[in-house]
């Protein structure tokens, strides 16, 4: 069983920008801003699989490979311009407007939708009678209300009053060249995200 998700990663320069935001929040001196995410873990999730058996993993890779060799995975661009606090999971993130309809960002919308369709297809075959069965967790369709975001801090309880501009920072625009299959691994140093396989966005 492996805990998996599909996503994209920022460039090295953007990782440094994200670390700058973390540093500014830390310099504010308020513990309520939370615990910084490791710089190696910065990413934007496209679709979450959860605990997954090897058989389901093989189906997933085969389906994504097929998509890559036929229609291809379309490159998209998304700008993160707002600090957002999600109180229940206690996550402070850099976010973009929620993607609730295709016209807002067609390329990203279809990327998320295609990821979700593949996962849903695997779920339908492996878990017909249960929401959590055979190693794949049943998911809602995130493209119906999908909020692009990059997590900056965990255990966060406060939202900074300042905007990015007021903090002297500029928005970050992600235009990834690859989509990754990540594995979430818990170890002595905390959670680490390892890239198992990648596909080009064209």
Image (cartoon, rainbow, N blue to C red):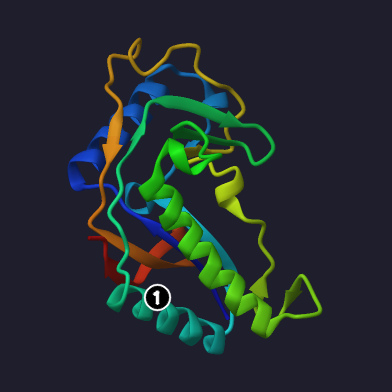
Judging by the rendered image, the residue that carries numbered circle 1 is 64
Position of 89 compared to 56: left or right?
right
Is residue 188 visible in this depiction of the protein?
A: no
Residue 86 percent location from the top left of the image: 61, 34
Instruction: Determine which quarter of the picture holds residue 79.
Output: top left
Compared with 172, 199 (above or below) is below
Image quarter (top left, top right, bottom left or bottom right) of the C terminus:
bottom left
Farthest right residue?
Answer: 129
Farthest bottom residue?
Answer: 55
Near mark 1 (Cα within 10 A), the count class, few <14, some 14-19 or many ≥20, is some
Name the element at disc 1: helix
Residue found 47% across the figure and 55% down from its top: 112
Say which of 201 and 17 sits in front: 201
Say which of 197 and 36 sits in front: 197
Residue found 35% across the figure and 55% down from its top: 8
Residue 98 percent location from the top left of the image: 52, 35
Position of 99 compared to 89: left or right?
left
Compared with 172, 51 (above or below) is below
Residue 12 percent location from the top left of the image: 19, 46
Instruction: Determine which quarter of the picture holds residue 164.
Output: top left
Count how many numbered circles sit on residues in the image: 1
């Amino acid at each position: 069983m492996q805990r998996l998700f599909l996503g994209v990663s920022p460039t090295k320069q953007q990782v440094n920008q994200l670390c700058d935001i973390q540093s500014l929040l830390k310099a504010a001196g308020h513990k309520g801003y939370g615990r910084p995410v490791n710089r190696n873990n910065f990413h934007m999730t496209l679709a979450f699989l959860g605990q997954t058996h090897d058989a389901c993993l093989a189906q997933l890779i085969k389906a994504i490979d097929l998509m890559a060799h036929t229609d291809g995975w379309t490159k998209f661009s998304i700008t993160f311009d707002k600090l957002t606090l999600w109180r229940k999971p206690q996550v402070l993130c850099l976010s973009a407007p929620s993607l609730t309809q295709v016209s807002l960002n067609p390329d990203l919308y279809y990327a998320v939708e295609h990821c979700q369709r593949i996962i849903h297809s695997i779920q339908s075959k492996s878990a017909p009678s249960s929401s959590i069965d055979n190693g794949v967790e049943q998911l809602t369709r995130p493209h119906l209300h999908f909020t692009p975001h990059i997590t900056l801090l965990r255990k966060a309880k406060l939202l900074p009053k300042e905007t990015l501009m007021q903090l002297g920072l500029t928005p970050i625009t992600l235009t990834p060249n690859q989509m990754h299959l990540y594995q979430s691994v818990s170890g002595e140093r905390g959670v680490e995200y390892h890239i198992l396989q990648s596909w080009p966005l064209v």
